[in-house]
Image (cartoon, rainbow, N blue to C red):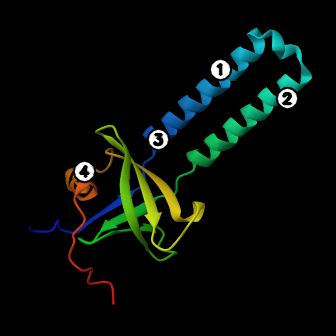
Amino acid sequence: MRGLPPCEVTVVRFAAWRTAVAVVAAAALLSLAAWLLTSPLGESAWVRGAVAAAALATLALAASLWRVPPVRLVWDGFGWSVAPVSGAEPATSGTLDVAVDLGAFLLLRFVAVGRRGPGGLRWIPVGRAGLEREWHAFRCAVYSPRPVAADPRQP
């Protein structure tokens, strides 16, 4: 079986991702506000404090998901690596899996090799906008089976 050729994609557009984050955050905040305004328990200071804390947590989560730095995703035929577009840091090797596939949008889960915990996991939203020419090859690389042959990058 022939391996998939190398593929490199630079992801810099995040409009769909930011729109989705804003919609979900707004829906969460509106549901908290509606519950607080219609609930007889909403009169308690403790309940109001808990709802305010939940609203702040929702805003903090939305703000953390809103900021996505541009990245370069590289498939070399054996594995994936992710590097910042600026080139300030070296590329990090790891595994790339599809978490959400909406056709023109992918939410990818990148797990760095040798890192554990939150520092080794990265969520990368990728939209087709701006990547029309590379989109098919990129999707093929993302869904391609990993080669079972020895990786020539390993000693």
The residue labelled by disc 2 is: 49
Q: Amino acid at mark 4?
A: Trp
Which residue is found at the position 73% from the left and 32% from the top? Answer: 55
The residue labelled by disc 3 is: 17
Please provide percent x and percent y for residue 60.
69, 43
Which residue is found at the position 30% from the left and 40% from the top? Answer: 104
Judge from the rendering whether residue 74 lies leftward or rightward of residue 28; answer left or right.
Answer: left
Q: Amino acid at mark 2?
A: Gly
State the residue in front, 95 or 22: 95
State the residue in front, 135 or 143: 143
Which residue is found at the position 82% from the left and 15% from the top? Answer: 42
Q: Amino acid at mark 3?
A: Trp
Question: Viewer-nearest of labels 2 and 4?
Answer: 2
Instruction: Compute the Cα span from label 2 to label 3.
Output: 30 Å
**Mark sitting on residue 31:** 1
The residue labelled by disc 4 is: 135
Please provide percent x and percent y for residue 143.
25, 54
* Mark 1 crowd level (few <14, some 14–19, many ≥20, 10 Å Cα): few
Instruction: Compute the Cα span from label 2 to label 4.
Output: 47 Å
Instruction: Compute the Cα span from label 3 to label 4.
Output: 17 Å
Instruction: Compute the Cα span from label 1 to label 2.
Output: 16 Å
